[in-house]
Image: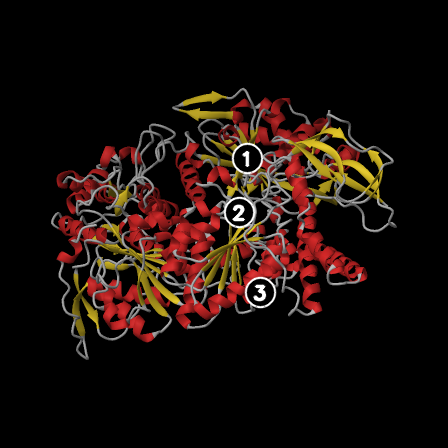
Amino acid sequence: MSDIQNENTTKPEAKLNLQGESEMILREAVAFALGEALEADNDVFMMGEDIGAYGGPYAVTRGFLEKYGEKRIKDTPISEAAIVGAGGGAAVAGLRPIVELMTINFSLVAMDQIVNHVARFRYMSNGQFEVPLVIRTVTGGGAQLGATHSQSFESMFASIPGLLVATPSTPYDALGLLRSAIKDNNPVIFAEHALLYGVKGKVPKTYYEIPFGKAAFRREGKDITIIGYSRMAHIADEAAEILSHRGIQADVIDLRTLRPIDMETIIKSVQKTNRAVIVEETWLTGGFSGEIASRIHETAFDYLDGPVVRVNGLDVPAPYSGKLEAATIPTALKVSESIRKNLGI
Amino acid sequence: MSININMPQMGYDMQEGTVVKWLKSAGDEISVGDVIAEIETDKAVVEFESPTKGQISELLVEEGQTIEVGKPIATIDDGENEQISDLTEKDTPAESIQETPVENEEPDPNHNEDDQQLNPSVTTSGIKASPIAKRLANERGIDLINVIGTGPGGRITKTDILNYSSDVKPKVALEEPSQVTELIQETPVEVEAEEKLEVQPDPEDSNSQTLSRMRQQIARVTTLSKQEKPHFYVSTDINMSEAMNVRTQINKALEADGIRISVNDMILLACVGALKEFPNMNAYFNNDRIQLNDQINIGMAIATDEGLIMPAIMDCDSKDLKEIAKSSKDLVHRSNSGSLRSQEYTGGTFAVSNLGIFDVTSFVAIIQPPQSAILAVGKVSPRPIVQNDSVTIGQVMTATLAADHRIVDGAEGAKFIQHVKTTLETPMSLVM
Amino acid sequence: MATNELRSSDDVGFAYDLAKSELTDFYRQMLRIRRFEESSANLYMQGHIKGFLHLYIGEEAIAVGSIAALSSNDYVVTHYRDHGHAIAKGMETKTAMAELCGKSTGSSGGKGGSMHLIDASKRFMGGYAIVAGQMPMAAGIALANQYRGDDSIVLCYFGDGAVNEGAFHETMNLASVWNLPMIFFLENNLYGMGTHADRARAGGAHEIYKAAEAYAMPGIQIDGMQLSTVYNHTRATVEDIRTNGGPRFIEAMCYRYRGHSMADPSMYRERDEVEENRERDPIDNYKNWLIGNQSFDEKIIKDIDSEIETEIASAVKFAMDSPEPEPDTLFENIYV
């Protein structure tokens, strides 16, 4: 795993004034939420590969080991199953662990622990166990890291009963959602996108949380609904910008969490615009866009002026070549063209 | 006391087993854990240990016999007093893990879309329109056949419908339809090109409701009927006293068979007889031609939650009173369960609408296109009548015929209803 | 197959600091588990228990002996052959039986089943169905104890099949690197379902405890069919961990008299082998020792036999009479 992410330098901790907002990048927002939680609650601790001495593979936890100590910032061996399973056990025993899987690609090594254990403890015990575990991980492709380092599995986790899944796309959302995730007594998959750590945004200084299951509008318009999450929420917004130049105004909905998902906001929007497009980075086949499209068809069929359009990653393993890889990931232009082709506008 | 030993469940998906060999016989004393038989499952031959102690009373199956899991294979006397029964009892063997798929019930009792003769244009195959475009078109009475679709693949979109309505000029007079089936355009509202009509009902306004599909259909059909058919009406009062008596007697006789004749059944049969005499009443009007129907299929009005439907009892000319009664009950039953056949909807040649149960004395019905006549009957109620120069109480029912004057004229209509009256007033003819 | 020579197995010093009541309790507990298992086997054959049922018959000395060496603050995590551990850690037989029968009065309201008996109040953290899947969780609980500075330890059971799974290796390593206060307790009955462990384990399956050395973890092998041995060694290990910290490894050689589960006709074992191992029956041997060596009156034994028979019959009746779970419980306790 290369050091590529460390090339985005971390600014010194954003100086917070006493009022208003501060501007920070997504990485800082995540770090802020983690630090805040570690300070507020002794039961919170972190476990993961290279989060301590190395400063975090994506520099999120730079400085944490020095500040919070070895007991609370634990560097683990490369043992994803043990990391997740031990996180689950510690959670069941009353602590509030935040574990890290270096990338979502490696979560596959821990799949049994995630699905058959962590997500099942509460149900199989019929409520005797609570599992306040946060599994932070890094998702997404586009950095030429090859077929086994470029995948996006958050939609897979979103189909598992017992898990919650968050996919923030801005610093504001990352901070608000991570706070909620840490406070939640259910297991959460918190998927940060590899290419979004440097995204800037304003963050209020007063305390706020973002509840799970509440999408956000990036812009509003009456002609079409474009839905996205994680990095694709940005692509959706860019596509909306292109459409606006040909007179089409879009509602752009950033889902923020996949489980629970805010269908209410989506349906209300589709009832207004009569057209829906979903942009998602993972493979078309089996992606969550299919799930969302089905729900729209089931609930808002009579409002549709055409089928729900999906713009997903191509059904191929990620290639190394930059030119090839770029062709596999949705872009704003692709979204715009797909809308023209499938909806005639 | 006697206990059953059942074919044991020896694997989570085992359904049945075979007793390969008995290792004990009737009369043997056994203890818990003694091997009493060798049993073959689909995987292997296994030794079966006794779950209880006692003396074997009887071996119930033979070697080589295959038995379902849970069924008894032997009985044992455990030497205890009578208490609770067997060591057994269990429901059915390991059920299959898969759930039975949920039946997807989709009966559409109205079959509105398939009513080709009434309204082919909205959903005929070949016309592509988005759901919202269809909905808008329906609501505004726009025939999709006339709309040009600008969406992908020629799909008619919402915009196409909105733009269409602004092009149509308001009509002053009704046009003569060239085809029975063509919908008359509703008088459209002039629309400014920029103005976007609010098509969704305002959720705040509880007084404004969208029509259900069924009501939309009814609206179309009745409008059509009144626009193209010059209706005229003939009424008569029918003395049903005799008919009621005969009915009571018949029903007594048929009680054992479980058949009940209703008043309406008698009316239907009376109409059959009259229709045979006056075939024009059983005809369709098509393109300036009268089309006689060789079958008599009488529609009867059935009230559903959504509205009145008039499915037909097919082929009544060969039915007697009992058969009519059976058919009418069957039709009601299948209307309620949503399993009417399409020809029952569209194949009626005449109809009887009976609002007697609603305490209505008389009313006038609308002819169902493409039929030419309909008989509307009210309730049978005691009224004073003159009989043999004195006033007495009779069970009287008012019947009103509505007929299409393009095929039937006044005299014919009158004679028809006279025939019906006579039949009902001399009801023995119905049972012979 | 002949059983292996074991490194140590002795009951010298076993009885001297245990009260008579404690000695009787060992017998009672083992018998309780035995009768419970026999009863559940019957219920399974009658169709009242469905799915998978893995019987602990023959291995009772391990659950009873090792759990008796724990304090009530200590935790147990185990695999799917978990009825013995559950009962030994304090789950009531009627609650366990009701769970096996899928009733609402079961330990998980009928939603767990035989492989997932769980009683958090007794710190019996559950049986789990994925081979070796329970091991990381056990390490996590030990981690929490260490984190909080309390001296509870975790006893994690697994079988000879589990030692070949990735999760075993990851957990052994992590526990040793972090010095987690837990016992890795291998119940080696020499069969991973239908495969003799020698066929699955590099170097054979008769000294698996030596693998602990590769993880810098102390390990021993004991005779799991002798209650006294199990108790003594577990007790010593528990004290060792409480004093010196860190994980330990115990391999207990044992034998299961029944198949892997109720669905298993045990075609892979010779009848003679099973018969030979009957001589090692832990309950018979312990009973004989109580009577012969400790001068117990046979009447005490008979009374216990009768007491257990009544208890198990009543547990069965409880399970039979209990209602099934209501449909809306389907959606309960997925999330907090």
The structure residue drawn at horizontal position 44% and vertical position 36%, both measured from the top left corner, is B112
Q: Earlier in the sequence, mark 2 or mark 1?
A: 2
Q: Distance between the residues labelled 2 and 1?
A: 16 Å
User: Amino acid type of disc 2?
Assistant: Asp
Mark drawn on residue C247: none
- Residue type at numbered disc 3: Ala
Whether label 2 touches label 1, CB < 8 Å: no
Q: Name the residue under label 1.
A: B339
Q: Name the foreground residue: B125 vs B102.
A: B102
Task: Give how far across and how far down residue B273 sits, in percent.
Answer: 63, 25
Image coordinates of residue B344 in percent, x first then y, are 53, 30
**Residue receiving disc 2:** B305
Q: Mark 2 lies on which chain?
A: B
Q: Which residue position holds label 3?
A: C69
Q: Locate residue B171: give its quadrant.
A: top left
List x then y, in percent, for residue B230.
43, 34
